[in-house]
Image (tube, rainbow, N blue to C red):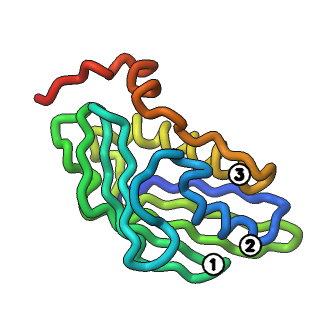
């Protein structure tokens, strides 16, 4: 039996160009306080919710209006025993023009149900992709984290201590 990578897909009545531009605007849908750059191959950026989750990601492929691919270089998730589950996984955004719509398929290659973080990561990605990124594409305004420390407090994890 093959393990399933986490994938979610949606269609919008916007152009592939609009969807592509939104994917590249990571601060517009994931977190306003990313560090680094996230627009072209070789760019490296870091997403962090202090005490809970940090991921340093490299942009490995950018095909205008078609595909964006990231590789997780280094990650730490404090909510699970194996804090490095995301390391060396790949995150793919594939954009396809359909009749009257544009389809966006997001896949976190390597994030499978075997991962301890799968359920919480699935919920997080589902929000950021299916809600925040979709909103950015359709309305021009996403719902990125604005203050990761406030997010940590809201999740009751601000005092999370290392194992």
Tell me the quarter of the image containing the C terminus.
Answer: top left
Circle 1 is placed at which residue position? Answer: 66
Above or below residue 59? Residue 87 is above
On the image, the x and y values in percent for residue 7 come to: 51, 56
Q: Which mark is residue 136?
A: 3
Please tell me whether mark 1 sits on a helix, a strand or a loop: loop
Instruction: Kindly indicate the quadrant of the structure image that contains residue 117.
Output: top left
Above or below residue 116? Residue 64 is below
Task: Look at the numbered discs 2 and 1 and tell me whether their residues touch, using CB distance below 8 Å.
Answer: yes
Please tell me whether mark 3 sits on a helix, a strand or a loop: helix
Q: Is residue 142 left or right of residue 123?
A: right
On the image, the x and y values in percent for residue 148 come to: 43, 34
Task: Look at the numbered discs 3 and 2 and tell me whether their residues touch, using CB distance below 8 Å.
Answer: no
On the image, the x and y values in percent for residue 87 come to: 24, 58
Residue at image location 55% in from the left, 52% down from the top: 27
Q: Is residue 89 left or right of residue 124?
A: left
Please tell me whether mark 2 sits on a helix, a strand or a loop: helix
Q: Which mark is residue 16?
A: 2
Task: Look at the numbered discs 1 and 3 and tell me whether their residues touch, using CB distance below 8 Å.
Answer: no
């Amino acid at each position: 039996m093959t393990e399933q990578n986490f994938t979610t897909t949606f269609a919008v009545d916007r152009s592939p160009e609009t969807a592509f531009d939104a994917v590249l605007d990571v601060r517009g849908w994931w977190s306003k306080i990313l560090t680094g750059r996230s627009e072209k191959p070789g760019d490296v950026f870091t997403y962090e919710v202090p005490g809970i989750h940090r991921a340093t990601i490299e942009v490995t492929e950018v095909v205008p209006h078609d595909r964006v691919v990231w590789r997780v270089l280094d990650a730490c998730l404090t909510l699970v025993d194996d804090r490095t589950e995301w390391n060396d996984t790949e995150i793919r955004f594939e954009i396809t023009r359909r009749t009257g719509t544009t389809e966006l398929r997001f896949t976190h290659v390597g994030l499978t149900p075997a991962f301890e973080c799968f359920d919480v990561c699935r919920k997080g990605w589902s929000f950021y992709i299916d809600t925040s990124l979709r909103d950015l594409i359709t309305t021009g305004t996403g719902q990125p984290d604005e203050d990761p420390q406030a997010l940590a407090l809201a999740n009751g994890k601000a005092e999370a201590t290392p194992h």
